[in-house]
Image (tube, helix red, strand yellow):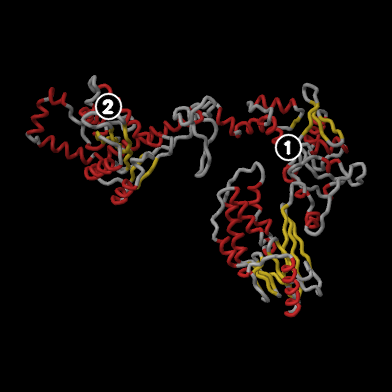
């Protein structure tokens, strides 16, 4: 009964016939067999004498085969995979309909690569495009027709670098009707086949056998040169002319031949590349004395009279990987690693440079290498034009309790270096918002506020308050306090003053805070060339010592001397010039500091958004352990 009138899959079976009577007869035979074998059928899952229906996820009728939309809609709503398990599950579901999808293996190639052993799971943009494109293909999958055995079949094959496919169909009234799609991903050995051999894989199960060079009359010494970059050698390039590379010819780079191809060609056949200059010929003759050709391989005679096999640069990089980070590599430095390559009897022209670059890119070596100031990134100073446009804020503390206060909230203007501070009992979002409201009402609403990622700054209450005032909130880089360097400098300055002015009990610091701020605002700042008080008010702040020793000045001020009033009028008009001069001086000092800082750095460091960098951990103490990385 099977094949002639019934198809069985696991615990499901379908009875069919060419006509209604024929199908009824086959159904009668099948039911009698079920009675004989005591096989129970679920009445709710049985459908009798239908002309079309859903079988194993396919809608099947007499004329065509198509996908079941109910199952496809479920697949089309799936989110992008987040793990190897979810990728394997999605490909398993989608692969069930691969016979309906053209180029299934090509489409899924970016995702199937993630299933290979040793490949890290990174669902990048290419995988996402393949995922979305496959879902689109499933939704719009074509309808396949049933084969007409009285008509001839047409089989079309195609091959790419990593997959082969075949399309089976028939022509009815000059129109091509699809019957079946098939595709297959190539393994490592099959990827090296020629295009014709790959296309034959779609039709026949062929086997490629290697023939020895002695039995292959078309063999040539250049065809046996190992060249990972070159997939094939054209027959027109093998002849008397040999238009291949010499060390100094650009043609070699274009054709991607090994660096020693001209030497092998000369030593094997004593032929020279046409077009070589006299200097190039003499250089080739001189270098050829240091090499030996042994049928398949080229060897270099070293200064220690040891023969070392010449390898292509791509193969050399693979050798470097083994001798540096293999089982007996040891992750040594460039000199020791290069010596290991030499001891293994391999050679290529730039082995020292490649070794240096390879060790620099080694992740394990970079995580454990000693770090100095030369490894810092270049400076990018923040320069603002108008005062009170940008403020930096930060918390200091906790300190010993002083009048119920344990923290100091510090804010500094990036132009004038004017500092505002307040002693607070806690360091939550509410006290920060109250502080900023007082600051805005006194000195105006700024353009931006810069802070770290602390929970007292990064929260919904803070963002809502700043949005009400139209202030942009900027955050410093995580674990990089230099981004808010001005605030850090203000913190150190205020803290240093308090350390030297508080009493022995250290509980009166909140009473000394405003005196410390006065001292800080009237101190000379080198980037400004004057004091913050002068930048803001365009006059020197008269200290108590002046009131003590210059009583005449006090009397004139109290009596409102018109001469001083006139002088004050001109001072206010000169305030803008003073601020512009302070801006130019500050920018000049920052540029000089950047030049002095960047010129001692090792190499050029340019980073883009999304680049992965190593976190320097020696000061942060984020991770513990004796074998921790730096």
Q: Nearer the viewer, residue 95 or 329?
A: 95
Residue 518 quadrant: top left
In x, y percent, where is residue 81?
A: 56, 52
Q: Secondary structure at mark 1?
A: helix
Label drawn at residue 94: none
Residue 501 seen: no
**In the drawing, does residue 294 fall left or right of residue 41?**
right
Which residue is most to the top? 504
Residue 178 seen: yes
Q: Which numbered mark, 1 or 2, is in the foreground of this view? A: 2
Label 1 to label 2, Cα distance in Å?
Answer: 65 Å
Disc 1 to disc 2: CB gap under 8 Å: no
Residue highlighted by disc 2 = 400
Residue highlighted by disc 1 = 315
Q: Nearer the viewer, residue 496 or 223?
A: 496
Q: Secondary structure at mark 2?
A: loop
């Amino acid at each position: 009964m099977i094949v002639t009138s019934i198809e069985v899959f696991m615990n499901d079976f379908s009875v069919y016939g060419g006509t209604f009577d024929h199908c009824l007869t086959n159904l009668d035979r099948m039911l009698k067999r079920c009675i004989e074998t005591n096989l129970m059928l679920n009445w709710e899952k049985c459908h009798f004498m239908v002309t079309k229906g859903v079988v194993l996820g396919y809608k099947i009728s007499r004329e065509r085969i198509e996908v079941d939309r109910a199952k496809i809609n479920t697949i089309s709503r799936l989110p992008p995979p987040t793990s190897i398990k979810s990728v394997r599950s999605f490909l398993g579901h989608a692969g069930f309909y691969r016979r309906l999808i053209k180029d299934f293996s090509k489409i899924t190639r970016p995702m199937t690569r993630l299933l290979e052993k040793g490949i890290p799971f990174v669902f990048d943009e290419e995988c996402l495009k393949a995922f979305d494109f496959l879902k689109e293909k499933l939704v719009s999958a074509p309808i396949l027709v049933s084969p007409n055995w009285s008509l001839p079949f047409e089989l079309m094959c195609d091959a790419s670098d990593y997959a082969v496919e075949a399309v089976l169909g028939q022509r009815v009234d000059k129109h091509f009707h699809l019957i079946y799609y098939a595709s297959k991903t190539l393994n490592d050995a099959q990827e090296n086949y020629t295009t014709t051999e790959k296309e034959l894989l779609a039709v026949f199960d062929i086997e490629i056998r290697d023939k020895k060079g002695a039995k292959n009359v078309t063999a040539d010494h250049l065809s046996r040169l190992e060249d990972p970059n070159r997939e094939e050698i054209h027959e027109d390039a093998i002849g008397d002319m040999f238009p291949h590379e010499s060390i100094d010819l650009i043609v070699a780079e274009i054709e991607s031949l090994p660096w020693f191809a001209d030497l092998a060609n000369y030593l094997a056949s004593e032929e020279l590349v046409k077009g070589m200059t006299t200097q190039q010929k003499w250089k080739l003759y001189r270098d050829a004395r240091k090499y030996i050709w042994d049928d398949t391989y080229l060897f270099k005679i070293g200064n220690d009279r040891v023969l070392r096999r010449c390898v292509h640069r791509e193969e050399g990089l693979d050798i470097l990987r083994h001798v540096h980070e293999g089982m007996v590599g040891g992750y040594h430095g460039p000199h020791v690693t290069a010596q290991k390559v030499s001891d293994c009897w391999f050679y290529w022209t730039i082995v020292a440079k490649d070794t240096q670059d390879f060790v620099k890119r080694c992740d394990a070596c970079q995580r454990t290498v000693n770090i100095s100031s030369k490894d810092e990134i270049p400076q990018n100073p923040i320069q603002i034009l108008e005062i009170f446009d940008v403020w930096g804020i930060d918390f200091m503390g906790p300190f010993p309790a002083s009048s119920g206060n344990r923290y100091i909230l510090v804010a500094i203007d990036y132009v004038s270096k004017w500092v505002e501070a307040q002693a607070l009992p806690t360091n939550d979002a509410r006290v920060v918002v109250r502080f900023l409201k007082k600051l805005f009402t006194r000195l105006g609403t700024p353009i931006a506020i810069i802070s770290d990622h602390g929970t007292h700054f990064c929260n919904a209450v803070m963002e809502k308050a700043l949005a009400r005032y139209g202030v942009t909130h900027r955050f410093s880089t995580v674990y990089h306090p230099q981004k808010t360097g001005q605030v850090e400098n203000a913190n150190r300055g205020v803290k240093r003053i308090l350390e030297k002015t508080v009493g022995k009990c250290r509980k009166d610091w909140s009473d000394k805070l405003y005196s410390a701020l006065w001292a800080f605002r009237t101190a000379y700042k080198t980037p400004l060339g004057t004091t913050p008080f002068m930048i803001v008010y365009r006059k020197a702040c008269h200290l108590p010592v002046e009131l003590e020793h210059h009583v005449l000045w006090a009397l004139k001020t109290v009596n409102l001397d018109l001469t001083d009033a006139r002088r004050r009028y001109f001072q206010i008009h000169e305030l803008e010039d003073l601020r512009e001069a302070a801006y130019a001086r500050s920018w000049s000092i920052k540029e000089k500091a950047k030049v002095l800082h960047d010129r001692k750095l090792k190499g050029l460091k340019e980073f883009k958004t999304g680049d992965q960098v190593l976190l320097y951990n020696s000061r942060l103490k984020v991770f513990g352990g004796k074998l921790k990385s730096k």
